[in-house]
Amino acid sequence: MNVRIAVTGLVATLLAIATSAAPAQIKVGVDLATTGPAASIGIPSKNVVAMWPKEIAGRKIEYIVLDDGSTPTGAVLNGRKLTSEEKIDVMVGPNTTPATIAMLDVLAESQTPMIALAASASIVLPMDAKRYWAFKMPQNDSLMATAVTKYMAEHGVKTLGFIGFSDAYGESWLTELNRLLDLRGIQLVDVERYNRTDTSVTGQVLKLMAANPDAILIAGAGTPSVTPQLALVQRAYKGQIYQTHGIATPEFLKVGGKDVEGTIFPTGPGVVALQLPGDVASKKVAVDFVKRYEAVYGPDSATQFACDAWGAWLVLADALPKALKVAQPGTPEFRKALRDAIESTRNLTVPQGVLNLSATDHQGFDQRARVMGKIVGNRFTFLSE
């Protein structure tokens, strides 16, 4: 009996030693809008998360994916759950600007690094104590606005109408336009706003039509970007319609149908990867990802947001081994080391461009991260002119 007790105790001790010696796994929290008006953005990102490797540098990785319902409130609740209860080492997402802005306080309080999948530069600028922990994958609006306004000026646009989301995404685009249009010799003749959940924008479109601009820019993302365009086409607007890089989803094409044909928009190289000329810096990485993604989810299924999510994994794959040399997962020291490793990312090619992050630039793309696109034959196509 005593021998049995001794053996049992020895086994328990050995198991405890083995358990304590096992390396801590890495915990990645993922907040996405997979329901609500931004679902067409969040679902492709969630698809990509399912493709992320489950181990790196000999460490297992656990991904905890939550849906914020396309609301800032949902994102904050998820952020608190992931940082306080799940004790994550890093956050990926949210994928809408209002949700990401709302998440900044949560990440700063818990000192958890975040790689956001939303676009607005206000997520990482101006640099302050909250944004110290925040990075983002999508191109800054300033980069895309520079490209699209240059294209407008080169193609004879002298007057422009604007309709955008009445949130941080729309306001960021309007700010960038106001900064650039005088330089381009373009006059902004009318500004309208609408909510992501609006089903009608008749009043705003009538005002835009009355201003008779040469072109109209719609500053929205996902399927809600279709609403103003349908109204403009139905009222026989004859000018050129431009959209932002937020439209690049199959759902936008499906909902818009023939009414979005001919739309011109700035986009990341990954969206039109298979059509890019060979001298585009990110073409090889972009084509590799698109082929892998479309092998699982079908032809023409890769989106701006899928590419961004794969880029987030490549950033983590580059940074995690560096952080593991400094501290163990599950500790404040590891989170800080991971933040520092992400900030030190240099010359990392991802589907959308080449990243060079720094203490003053938590986005890191240059002009190699943008191309112009056009919807032709209900497909996103590379615009070579």
Image: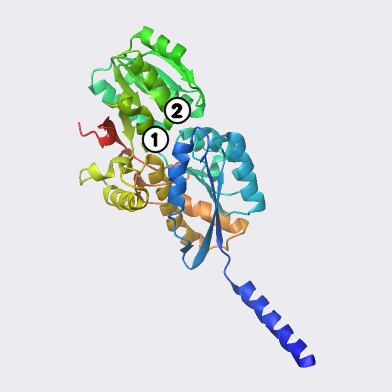
Query: Which residue is under mark 1?
Result: 251
Q: Position of residue 62 (x, y in %)?
A: 54, 58
Badge 2, how many Cα within 10 Å: few under 14, some, many 20+? many
Q: Quadrant of residue 206?
A: top left
Q: Nearer the viewer, residue 148 or 376?
A: 376
Residue at x-position 23% and y-position 21%:
155
Side (left or right) of 311 relative to 12:
left
Between the C-alphas of marks 2 and 1, the distance is: 10 Å
Q: Is residue 317 above or below residue 100?
A: below
Question: Given this view, does label 2 or label 1 mark the residue nearer the observer?
Answer: 1
How far from the left and from the top, in percent, is residue 9?
74, 83
Q: Earlier in the sequence, mark 2 or mark 1?
A: 2
Q: Quadrant of the C terminus?
A: top left
Viewer-proximal residue, 316 or 239?
Answer: 239
Instruction: Point out which mark residue 55 bears.
Output: none
Q: Is residue 107 left or right of residue 209?
A: right
- Image quadrant where residue 76 sits: top right
Q: Identity of the amino acid at label 2? A: Pro
| Near-viewer residue (114 or 232) | 232
- Secondary structure found at label 1: helix
The residue pinned by badge 2 equals 224
Q: Quadrant of the N terminus?
A: bottom right
Residue extending furthest toward the top: 210
Residue at position x 39%, y 17% in the image: 231
Amino acid on which the number 1 mark rests in the picture: Glu
Few, some or many residues within 10 Å of mark 1 (<14, 14–19, 20+): some
Q: Secondary structure at mark 2?
A: helix
Q: Is residue 362 visible?
A: no
In percent of width and height, residue 233 lies at 33, 18
In the picture shown, does residue 367 fall above or below 63? above
